[in-house]
Amino acid sequence: PPTPTKFHYIFSLRDLSRVFQGICQADPQIVNKPDTLVRLWRNECSRVYEDRLNEDGDKTFLGEKTVAGLIKTQFPTSAAVALADPMIWGDFKDAGDILIKSETPYAEPRMYEDMGAWEDIRPILDNILEMYNTDNSPMNLVLFNDALSHLVRIHRIIRLTRGMALLIGIGGSGKQ
């Protein structure tokens, strides 16, 4: 329930529609097995609901107890695949090639898919950062796993219709 410290803990049917909007981003040729669909559903629930929570206890309750419990009871044959971590979904696997080859990279079709592990997406994002640094004033960023996690989340929000986020950081953490 919302409290003065958790004023943003208000959920509505619009949030449920955002879960399905995220699921609809995926191509049926990519998400073609029940295990993958359940994993995608888990990802979208995490992005819509869990990302809004600010206390570890609340995140644990939703992610490890509620959603994981539902998957284990309702989809026991898919549980091993669906509950595997890390859970990284995105549509930027070919982003480097698209940026180089296309005049209108924003219009190119991209597949929303399970991106694998952090080691799989780090070279992709490092390549995009390197391309940015060659054309603009350099950003000296270290893309550690938490930074990659935030980039993936923000990318998902920006790609959604009417996607918006309130980004809050601790003072002195380097945000400018």
Image (cartoon, grey):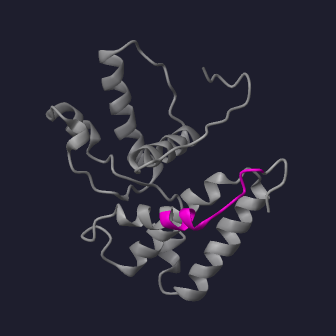
Where residue 2 sits, quadrant-wise, is bottom right
Where residue 101 sits, quadrant-wise, is top left
Whole-percent x, y for residue 15 in the image = 56, 62
Whole-percent x, y for residue 29 in the image = 24, 70
The magenta span reads 7-17
Above or below, comparing residue 46 to residue 28 in the picture: above
Please indicate whether residue 90 sits to the left or right of residue 173 in the image. left
User: Which residue lies at the image location 15% right of the left edge and 31% below the top edge?
Assistant: 103
Q: Is residue 165 magenta?
A: no
150 and 12: which one is in front? Answer: 12
Q: Is residue 11 magenta?
A: yes
Above or below, comparing residue 86 to residue 125 in the picture: below
44 and 146: which one is in front? Answer: 44
Seen from this angle, which residue lies furthest right? 4
User: Which residue lies at the image location 67% right of the left edge and 35% below the top edge?
Assistant: 168
Whole-percent x, y for residue 27 in the image = 28, 65
Whole-percent x, y for residue 156 in the image = 44, 49
Q: Quadrant of the N terminus?
A: bottom right
Above or below, comparing residue 22 to residue 151 in the picture: below
Where residue 74 sits, quadrant-wise, is bottom right
Please indicate whether residue 30 sits to the left or right of residue 55 in the image. left
Please indicate whether residue 172 sits to the left or right of residue 29 in the image. right
Q: Quadrant of the C terminus?
A: top right
